[in-house]
Image: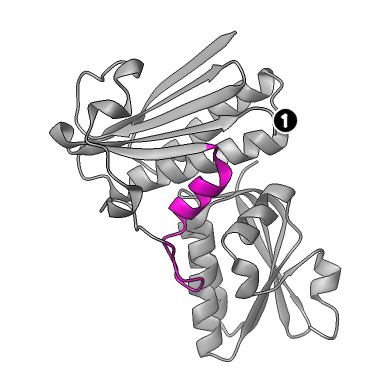
Amino acid sequence: MDFSVHQRRYGDHTIVAVAGDIDVETSPRLREFLIGLVDDGARHLVIDLGGVTFLDSTGIGVMIGVLHRLRAANGTMSCAGGSTAVRSVFRVTQLTRVFALHDSLDQALLPAH
Amino acid sequence: MTIVLEMTLPRSAESAPLVRHALDASLCGLGVTSDVRADIALALGEACANVIKHAAAGREYEVRARVEGERCVVEVIDGGAGGIEPWDAGPTSGRSRSVADSAAWDGGEAPVTAESGRGLQLMRAFTDEFHVADRVSRNGAIVHFERMLAS
């Protein structure tokens, strides 16, 4: 599947739907997109991983880098969905200690979050 | 049945998905489950990403993958141009040293909030055997990993 990234607003949240492979080739595009959102004032990002077919350490690095920027601006970031393979990358790298990985987008957008 | 896939690739970011998808399609054709294919794709992707980001010598690198019985064996070879040693020469043809010493990799376990350094961690977690050997004479390295095809 071709890589794509789209955003939409949901209250205070900005939902970023990513599809395709997040790897050494596409990570720079994801980084540029997410940093652009933060620069434009987005503060609460929810990354929808439902369409992600591959995630490697370069993609993880992009998310951590954006998280650092957001935290410096009192923002938040969480992720939602994702295949078994994508979720196992989160588990092995212990990313779930850094930001939340919700089972679904609906759960990520619950008022409590 | 033994399947061998050999690809010589430009050291550019576009090469990583190309070789990942080529191997994945071959393994799919052999009936390997999606869980195991995902592990192999990740390990291969990390090895390719490392070559693309760090390798000093050579404009090309080589990926050799073979399926032998119940295991998939993959080598990602960078450095130097011209002839490549045959499979059997493998990693033992270079000076073996621990992965953590290798300057090309970021080494060790990364702090959980670091932006890089997770490649090795992922390769170890998703393979059954993994090592890196230097190719001193060619200023490069061979990343070797194996994954059992039955999860």
* Residue annotated with mark 1: B33
> Which quadrant of the figure has residue A63?
bottom right
The outermost residue toward the bottom is: A74
Quarter residue A49 falls in: bottom right
Residue B13: where, in percent of width, then height? 41, 44
Direction from residue A47 to residue B80 in the image, left or right: left
Pinpoint residue B135: horizontal percent, then vertical percent. Answer: 22, 34
Left or right: where B105 falls relative to A85: left
Residue A5 in the image: above or below residue B94: below
**Residue B29 vs residue B66: left or right?**
right
Q: What range is drawn magenta here?
A: B109-128
Q: Residue furthest top?
A: B1
Whether residue B79 is situated above or below residue A33 in the rendered picture: above
Query: Looking at the magenta stretch, what is its main secondary structure?
Result: loop
Per the image, is B127 magenta? yes
Residue at the image point whose x is 67% and y is 62% from the top:
A6
Mark 1 secondary-structure assignment: loop
Q: Nearer the viewer, residue B67 or A41?
A: B67
Q: Residue furthest left?
A: B137
Q: Position of residue B17 (x, y in %)?
A: 51, 38
